[in-house]
């Protein structure tokens, strides 16, 4: 672009963008650098120095096995699958009932769900812990799935809003044609709320993948129930300050998110844009 | 089953009212059960616990309001509550920056997608990984020190970012800007893109520059969503948790209210006190939400219904 000179305002704009991108990437790139350095090399080289070899994979191999990554990936996949399934099913069902029918207690139920959204989930764990223990849901994959599904109020919000935009005359027409309410829900409305489902899948998927506190609190056996987000826990003790291993572990947990992001970028942006509004 | 009975049953099932109740009950049974088990039951239990001196197992003693008295008189709980203000400050910076970058990236710009993706990506990094990333980042002689050394700071005079009480809360609150700026930026970009392009076209014909367009078109249009996010941010600051939990585990005076609550309940065995803290926090949030509704109405006006 030699023809057009950069105006000072525009240059300043780019400068801020480049600085922000630098700050954004610096913590991640330096972790990447450290992940390719051997113990000795890490000790003598600076944090900003390039590694001697980009093919030095020992740290990754150690992190992969020490942190039980294969199991962590498997557990996270299972938890994600069932949590997403559960959130979509329960969320759409509640939203359908609350949006399409008037009945005694409707206001109360709706209020109960919306009020629950005010309470930060992490605050409730003081007493939820006792309930989870007495139900035998500690150290149990179904337990954490139930907890993730059962505290997902944001999905209900999104579905409620979406149902609002679908005209009721559609249900009426189907009903007159002899369809039951069940048929209307599954055959007529369910396909129409696909955009809302995608939004919920993205929001809930990201949140579940990242979630550390509940996973750490309720999946205590780190040998059997380790997830991607808790897998690095093992490095807190034994490996203490051996950042070359830790950084390789961090990279392993980032890579799936990066791949998903590259493929689903558009959906993730629109999911975030739509979902966070009603938080 | 003879035919007349069948038609009667059929008729009964076909009735609107019957069907309605069947749907209502079957569809809301499981979600309601989950809601009660994981939100309202814990809530009631928490109120109950807050009047006891107790652990999760073993005997408990009723001590009345002593836990609440402790919440407001212990120096550590008060300090933790005051730590919220670091996160509020970070939140203000985060929202201002995200508003700026959202505006910049909404106009035609080179490599716009790259910048958007780069600024957003930290939001996808999972909890404990973030903890390690920043422990490494702030460790003596590592990333931050090296960068500051490059631009001329004397490395020996730099503080211990996570250990020194004069600075560590700033260090951790800054990571929440790193992590969440991109999220609110994407949110604002979505809102800006929903503004009809005709507004800009008209403004450009009138000779308005970008800054004027921002002040007179974008900002007024974004008022509801910005207001909402400011209020959510204030709420979020009081319940700030993951940063201090995964980076320093609340050591050296970095514990926020929720981190302290977690440690009291799950490590120190003071479930009653932790419950009282939780109730106090919920009261703050509830009051905040009420204030929010009022403020929202004042700023945005009556016509838009507050989204809670």
Image (spheres, rainbow, N blue to C red):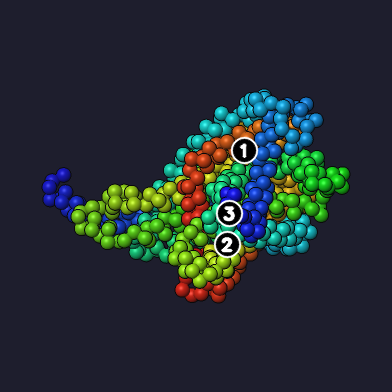
Q: CA distance from mark 1 to mark 3?
A: 51 Å
Asked if marks 1 and 3 touch (Cβ < 8 Å), the reply is: no
The residue that label 1 is drawn on is A230
Q: Nearer the viewer, mark 3 or mark 2?
A: 3
Q: CA distance from mark 2 to mark 1?
A: 30 Å
Residue B291 vertical position relative to residue B16 in the rendered view, above or below: below
Q: Is residue A157 left or right of residue A218?
A: left
The residue that label 3 is drawn on is A4
Please tell me how crowded label 3 is: few (under 14), some (14-19), or many (20+) other residues with Cα within 10 Å.
Answer: few
Disc 1 is placed on an element classified as: loop
Instruction: Locate residue A23, reporting x and y percent.
Output: 68, 47
Instruction: Locate residue B110, reporting x and y percent.
Output: 56, 50
The residue that label 2 is drawn on is B229
Q: Nearer the viewer, residue A109 or B5?
A: A109
Q: Nearer the viewer, residue B218 or B197?
A: B197
Which residue is painted at 47% across and 65% down in the image? B201
Residue B68 vertical position relative to residue B182 in the rendered view, above or below: below
**Chain name for mark 2:** B
Which residue is painted at 57% across and 62% down in the image? B229
Q: Is residue A87 left or right of residue A184?
A: right
User: Which disc is residue B300 wearing?
Assistant: none
Disc 2 is placed on an element classified as: helix
Instruction: Locate residue A15, reporting x and y percent.
Output: 66, 53
């Amino acid at each position: 672009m030699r023809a057009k000179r950069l105006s000072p305002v525009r240059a300043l704009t780019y400068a801020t963008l480049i600085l922000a991108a630098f700050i954004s990437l610096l913590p991640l790139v330096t972790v990447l650098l450290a992940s390719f350095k051997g113990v000795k090399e890490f000790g003598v080289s600076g944090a900003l120095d390039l590694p001697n070899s980009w093919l030095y994979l020992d740290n990754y191999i150690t992190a992969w096995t020490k942190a039980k990554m294969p199991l962590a990936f498997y557990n996270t996949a299972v938890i994600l699958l069932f949590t997403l399934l559960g959130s979509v099913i329960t969320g759409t069902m509640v939203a359908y009932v609350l949006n399409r029918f008037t009945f005694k207690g409707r206001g109360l139920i709706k209020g109960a769900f919306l009020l629950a959204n005010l309470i930060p989930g992490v605050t409730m764990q003081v007493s939820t812990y006792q309930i989870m223990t007495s139900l035998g849901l500690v150290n149990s994959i179904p337990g954490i799935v139930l907890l993730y599904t059962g505290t997902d109020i944001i999905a209900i919000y999104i579905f409620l809003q979406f149902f609002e935009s679908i005209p009721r005359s559609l249900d009426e027409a189907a009903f007159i044609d002899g369809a039951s309410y069940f048929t209307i829900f599954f055959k007529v409305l369910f396909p129409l709320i696909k955009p809302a489902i995608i939004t919920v899948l993205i929001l809930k998927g990201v949140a579940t993948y990242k979630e550390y506190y509940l996973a750490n609190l309720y999946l205590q056996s780190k040998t059997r129930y380790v997830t991607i987000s808790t897998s690095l826990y093992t490095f807190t003790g034994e490996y203490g300050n051996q950042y070359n291993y830790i950084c390789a572990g961090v990279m392993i947990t980032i890579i799936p998110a990066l791949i998903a992001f590259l493929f689903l970028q558009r959906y993730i942006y629109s999911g975030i844009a739509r979902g966070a509004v009603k938080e | 089953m003879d035919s007349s009975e069948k038609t009667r049953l059929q008729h009964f099932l076909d009735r609107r009212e019957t069907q309605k109740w069947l749907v209502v009950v079957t569809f809301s049974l499981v979600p309601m059960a989950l809601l009660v088990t994981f939100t309202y039951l814990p809530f009631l239990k928490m109120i109950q616990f807050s009047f006891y001196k107790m652990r999760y197992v073993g005997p408990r003693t009723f001590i009345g309001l002593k836990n609440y008295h402790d919440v407001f008189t212990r120096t550590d709980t008060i300090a933790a509550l005051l730590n919220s203000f670091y996160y509020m400050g970070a939140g203000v910076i985060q929202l201002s920056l995200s508003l700026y970058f959202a505006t910049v990236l909404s106009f035609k710009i080179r490599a716009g997608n790259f910048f958007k993706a780069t600024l957003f990506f930290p939001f996808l990094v999972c909890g404990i990984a973030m903890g390690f990333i920043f422990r490494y980042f702030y460790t003596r002689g590592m990333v931050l020190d090296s960068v500051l050394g490059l631009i001329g700071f004397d490395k020996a005079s730099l503080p211990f970012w996570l250990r020194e009480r004069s600075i560590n809360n700033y260090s951790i609150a800054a990571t929440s800007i790193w992590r969440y700026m991109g999220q609110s930026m994407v949110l604002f970009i979505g809102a800006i893109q929903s503004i009809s392009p005709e507004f800009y076209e008209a403004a450009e014909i009138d000779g308005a520059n970008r800054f004027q367009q921002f002040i007179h078109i974008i900002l007024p249009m974004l008022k509801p969503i910005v207001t909402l996010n400011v209020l959510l941010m204030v709420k979020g600051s009081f319940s700030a948790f993951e940063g201090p939990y995964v980076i320093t585990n609340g050591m050296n005076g970095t514990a926020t209210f929720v981190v302290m609550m977690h440690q009291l309940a799950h490590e120190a065995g003071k479930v009653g006190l932790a419950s009282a803290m939780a109730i106090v926090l919920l009261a703050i949030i509830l009051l905040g939400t009420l204030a929010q509704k009022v403020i929202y109405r004042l700023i945005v006006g009556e016509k838009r219904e507050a989204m809670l």
